[in-house]
Image (tube, helix red, strand yellow):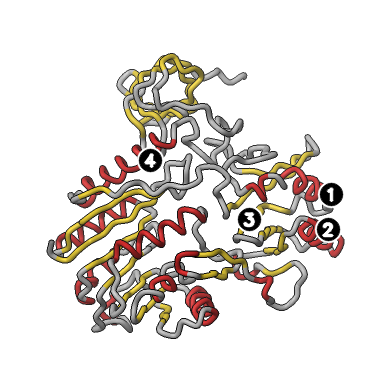
């Protein structure tokens, strides 16, 4: 029996969800609508029905919002990598600030005394890290490389990407041809891309061991295009150069933090910020918001490879970096040694546990910087007053956990002085933000 087509209806878009979809109502039920903006009237086709809500996509815009723009990528309507390419960048930033304000009110019952101007930089060709799916379609005898389609496990057939670093985007057709030539073309599941300022690396996730011939083809392709080739046969610990040589200087990529005169080294599988321009501006902003003095002792929590820690050490007397991963604290210490910074200390410690038994318990600091994962820093917030810092800067990748943590700090006598959004992921609904807290106030 043939499947009946889902219906189409005219909808009035009332608001935007936290995922960047338009919100409408039809027959008393909420409908989330892809590619729709508040204030618009659209004709939408239903994608699926759920018990509590339906999902749909725009077929025709009957009355457009003044914030609507032509998407810069021809794949915007199908690709799941971006959700807001149809929205002007100014409107995206306004939406993100409103989302942050709403979360602060809802989860923290708090709002900042003032809003920081949005931090912005390039909106295209900005993405320096990405994980692309790979699938060989036997019936079509064609290999696909791309992000997932919206609402689907299928891959978008990408020949270029408007948000990827141009050095990778323009290589996609040649990369596809190379992978199609492999005997193991059905065994490459993912490609992870990482870029430094000068170096590029590809990590090929292969489900079966590569033959010597396939390995050589990948090595030669990467050498021809100035890439460093890595293989990954299992978990992250299995990532290694396809040449199987010992670690060398080529085992590191680098990015610059010019105002701190730093060149940061990282492994392609390390966590780094995807937007180099925003990262440079974010580091400068965080240090300025901390109001550092040369005599200060500073604590950098969730320090990673030292993205904030080393710039802090350029301005403060003593800096302590704490991170849950031993490997990342070793990378941070490596970066510190490379720059002759010897007034830095790094500890590997789980910051999601009760910190009363921490190696830092009982110490005092003048300033604290926090850059936690999406789960936030609840345990840190509960212990933070014991460190005595009168000023705290919190960098967040999740406004809901920032709001929760802000509420905890407020209950302990800290005031949310200012907050703002940073456009780390243009054309997506992802909200990156920064907040400043002062004791008392």
Expressed as whole percent of the image width and height from the top left, the position of residue 38 reads 35, 26
> In the rendering, at what x and y percent does residue 264 appear?
54, 69
What label does residue 93 carry, if any? 4
Q: What is the spatial separation of the Cα atoms under label 1 and label 4, in whole angstroms?
A: 43 Å
Which residue is rendered at x = 38% and y = 40% of the image? 93
Q: Is 424 rendered above or below residue 378?
A: above
Pointer 1: what residue?
A: 181
Residue that badge 3 annotates = 193
Residue designated by label 2: 217
- How many angstroms separate mark 2 from mark 3 (CA)? 18 Å
| Residue situated in front as seen by the camera: 123 or 50 | 123
At mark 2, the secondary structure is helix
Mark 4 or mark 1, which is nearer the start of the sequence? 4
Measured from the top left, where is residue 42 in percent x and y?
A: 43, 18
Report the residue at 35% width, 52% height from top.
Answer: 433
> Residue extending furthest right?
213
Q: What element does badge 1 sit on?
A: loop
Mark 2 or mark 3, which has the lower sequence index? Answer: 3
Answer left or right for 371 relative to 193. left
């Amino acid at each position: 029996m043939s499947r009946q087509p889902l219906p189409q209806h005219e909808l009035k878009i009332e608001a935007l969800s936290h995922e960047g979809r338009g919100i409408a109502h039809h027959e008393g039920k909420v409908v989330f609508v892809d590619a729709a903006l508040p204030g618009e009237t659209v004709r939408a086709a239903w994608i699926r029905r759920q018990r509590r809500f339906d999902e749909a996509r725009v077929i025709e815009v009957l009355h457009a919002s003044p914030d609507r723009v032509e998407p810069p990528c021809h794949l915007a309507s199908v690709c799941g990598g971006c959700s807001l390419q149809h929205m002007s960048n100014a409107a995206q930033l306004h939406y993100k600030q409103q989302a942050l304000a709403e979360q602060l009110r809802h989860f923290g019952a708090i709002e900042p005394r003032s809003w920081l101007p949005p931090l912005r930089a390039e909106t295209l060709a900005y993405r320096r890290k990405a994980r692309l799916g790979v699938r060989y379609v036997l019936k079509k005898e064609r290999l696909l490389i791309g992000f997932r389609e919206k609402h689907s496990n299928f891959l978008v057939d990408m020949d270029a990407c408007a948000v990827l670093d141009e050095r990778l985007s323009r290589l996609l057709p040649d990369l596809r041809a190379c992978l199609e030539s492999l005997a193991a073309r059905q065994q490459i599941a993912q490609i992870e891309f990482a870029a430094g300022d000068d170096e590029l690396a590809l990590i090929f996730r292969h489900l079966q061991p590569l033959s010597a011939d396939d390995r050589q083809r990948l090595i030669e392709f990467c050498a021809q295009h100035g890439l460093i080739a890595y293989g990954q046969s299992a978990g992250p610990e299995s990532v290694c150069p396809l040449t199987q040589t010992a670690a060398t200087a080529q085992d590191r990529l680098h990015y610059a933090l010019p105002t701190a005169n730093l060149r940061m080294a990282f492994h392609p599988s390390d966590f780094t910020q995807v937007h180099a321009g925003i990262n440079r501006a974010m580091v400068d902003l965080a240090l300025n918001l901390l109001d550092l003095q040369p005599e200060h002792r500073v604590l950098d929590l969730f320090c990673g490879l030292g993205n904030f820690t080393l710039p802090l050490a350029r301005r403060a007397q003593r800096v302590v970096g704490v991170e849950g991963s031993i490997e990342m604290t070793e990378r941070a210490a490596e970066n510190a040694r490379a720059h002759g910074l010897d007034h830095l200390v790094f500890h590997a410690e789980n910051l999601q546990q009760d910190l009363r038994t921490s190696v830092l318990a009982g110490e005092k600091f003048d300033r604290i910087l926090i850059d936690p994962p999406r789960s936030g820093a609840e345990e840190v917030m509960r212990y933070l007053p014991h460190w005595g810092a009168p000023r705290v800067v919190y960098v967040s990748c999740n406004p809901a956990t920032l709001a929760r943590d802000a509420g905890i700090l407020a209950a302990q006598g800290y005031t949310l002085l200012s907050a703002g959004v940073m456009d780390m992921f243009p054309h997506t609904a992802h909200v990156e933000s920064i907040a400043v807290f002062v004791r008392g106030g």
